[in-house]
Image (cartoon, rainbow, N blue to C red):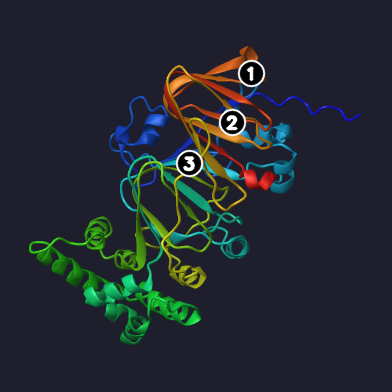
Amino acid sequence: MEDPPPPPPPPQRLRCAVQHYEWGRRGAASIVARLADQQDPDLARPYAELWMGTHPSGPSTLLDGDGDLMLLRDWLARTPDALGPAVAARWGGDLPFLFKVLSVAKALSIQAHPDKKRAEALHALRPSVYKDDNHKPEMAIAITEFRALYGFAAIQELKDVLRTVPEVEGLIGHEHAAKLMSFKEYDAGNQVKSTLQSAFANLMLASKDMVSEALSKLISRLNIESKIRTLTDKEELVLSLERQYQEDVGVLAALFFNYVKLSPGEALHIGANEPHAYLSGECIECMATSDNVVRAGLTPKYKDIQTLCSMLTYKQAFPEILQGVPVQPHVRRYSPPFDEFEVDWCLVPADEVVTISSVPGPSVFLVITGEGELHAESLSGGKKEAKEGDVFFVPAYTEINLSTHKSMQLYRAGVNSRFFS
């Protein structure tokens, strides 16, 4: 007869890293500062991201049994049962996902994340720039109203841009502009993709002087026209981006992409080689454990325009917006088409108890608002206090009961259920 599996180790309270990227909201205006328990946040300092996971650029830590601080990654190496056998076997004893909170005051770079094969090649070629050899599919769930650019707009919208923004035509080339104008909505395939790729590369590689002149004309024209008509959302966006990043080609590139507006609770998932940029708002983000980014605009950081233009899919479609699927009372699940992760959003009223069933892989729980207790059989005393900003690593095969004193909003990141089915 087989021995029963060993009991799971207890949930662990995590201490998590804060990233102070320049685009973050400042001081107490940032949810990241509030969650990270910054009692008196520096009003002048940006609090951009809270990282929960094992990535070496912002690793989480915990107190071990002797009260010593240790990396979550080292604890997992010492406690492999916490991952569950399937996850440990597939991802080499590490947590396959990185969980984050973002607080965005100004636009992040226009960027894409390479697929696994390209990530390995870029890392081998330029390890100082591309520090990971892993892909980075990701998902953002809006906490507040959230704005983003994602993927190339449909051909009709691009034709409208060429018709109404003459400043762009000179940068992409008259021949490419004429070709794009000749395509119909139902045209598809390699010809459209090839023309779009050439036009976009011409724009992104245009000289600084040409970009500066085109932007100067466009901004001046929009400021005049705003006095006699209501500007479109995209035109307002161009003005806003130009105030943040003067003379940056990314301001013009934004016209080529879908402008996505998420309401709280809506989500967007982003696959490999798809262009995107987060613009404003606060969100939960989950991704494969990687920090691989190829940037090309709206950033003072290193731009690798040639690589970005060559790697994009050039698909033209508005992205799928996930609403989350109810999986039990008070819990909605966001399941992107990636094995590494899924996210549950739990909204638990005051004085309720909700059972989060055990799963065969690890989870990370984050309390956004409210307070109560987290109960698990493996915990000494059976429970831990859970309040705003608390983050817990929950081992595989651990059932959690949440009891609330005040209504609680909590997110759980875990390995995608489809991986186990």
Residue type, label 2? Phe
Q: Is residue 402 above or below residue 95?
A: above
Does residue 22 appear anywhere in the picture?
yes
Separation of disc 3 and disc 2 at Cα? 14 Å
In the image, residue 304 lies at what x, y percent?
45, 66
Judging from the image, what secondary structure is the residue with disc 3 in?
Answer: strand
Foreground residue, 22 or 316?
A: 316
Disc 2: which residue? 393
Give the answer, above or below, for where 381 lies relative to 1.
above
Q: CA distance from mark 1 to mark 3?
A: 25 Å
Question: What residue would you read off at disc 1?
Answer: 379
Residue extending farthest to the top is 381
Q: Is residue 133 above or below residue 372?
A: below
Please provide percent x and percent y for residue 200. 39, 74
Q: Residue furthest right?
A: 1
For marks 2 and 1, the one nearer the N-term is 1
Which of 99 and 319 lies nearest the eye of the viewer? 319
Q: Amino acid at mark 3?
A: Lys
Residue type, label 1: Leu
Please report the residue visible at 34 percent of the width from the left and 87 percent of the height from the top.
175
Residue placed farthest to the bottom in the image? 175
Percent of width and height locating residue 374: 55, 21
Q: Report the Cα–Cα distance between label 2 and label 1.
A: 12 Å
Residue identified by numbered label 3? 100
Q: Quadrant of residue 202?
A: bottom left
